[in-house]
């Protein structure tokens, strides 16, 4: 299992519109093979900062099972207009 962490900075004043776009588009991600959990969080002190946390079976499940699909294109079309800058996306392994 790997954890995808995406730091998303939204244009100030667009937070509510971003959240609504996410709610409408998250099913595009949820149906991806290899997805285990999906969670979006919003900063308390920095409300324009969001962190997307997704557990995948593997990095390949994320990249091939979602990022290389038409669902990813639709996902970015839905939420991308609210980005203040490109998200920072990284994968993490658990430390045992």
Image (cartoon, rainbow, N blue to C red):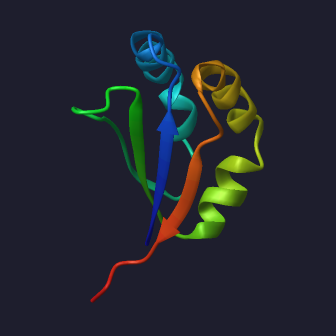
In this rendered view, identify the residue nearer to me: 81 or 61: 81
58 lies left or right of 95: right
Q: Residue furthest bottom?
A: 96
Q: Residue at x 48, y 23 (%)?
A: 22
The image quadrant that residue 89 belongs to is bottom right
Q: Residue at x 50, y 26 (%)?
A: 10
Residue 23 position in % (x across, y down) = 43, 20
Q: Could you tell me if residue 3 is visible in this image?
A: yes
Task: In this rendered view, identify the residue nearer to me: 69 or 52.
Answer: 52
**Closer-to-camera residue (61/22):** 22
In this rendering, the answer to whether 64 lies above or below 80 is below
User: 87 or 24, which lies in front?
Assistant: 87
Q: Quadrant of the C terminus?
A: bottom left
- Residue 75 vertical placement versus 82 (above, below): below
**Residue 69 in the image, given as x and y percentages of width and height:** 76, 43
Q: Is residue 32 left or right of residue 45?
A: right
Q: Which residue appears farthest toward the left when viewing the image?
A: 44
Q: Is residue 30 visible in the rendered structure shown here? A: no
Task: From the viewer's perspective, tell me whether residue 91 is left or right of residue 3.
Answer: right
Estimate the x, y position of residue 30 in percent, counting from the top left: 48, 39
Identify the residue at horizontal 72%, vertical 58% (top origin).
64
Q: Relative to 48, is 29 above or below?
A: below
What residue appears at the point 43 percent right and 72 percent down from the top-left corner? Answer: 1
Say how many tags the image has: 0
Quarter occupied by residue 3: bottom left
């Amino acid at each position: 299992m790997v954890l995808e962490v995406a730091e998303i900075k939204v244009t100030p004043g667009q937070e509510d519109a971003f959240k609504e776009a996410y709610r409408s588009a998250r099913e595009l991600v949820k149906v991806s093979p290899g997805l285990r959990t999906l969670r979006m969080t919003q900063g308390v002190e920095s409300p324009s900062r969001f962190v997307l946390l997704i557990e995948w079976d593997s990095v390949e499940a994320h990249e091939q099972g979602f990022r290389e699909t038409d669902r990813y294109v639709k996902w970015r079309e839905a939420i991308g207009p609210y980005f203040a800058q490109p998200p920072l996306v990284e994968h993490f392994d658990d430390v045992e």
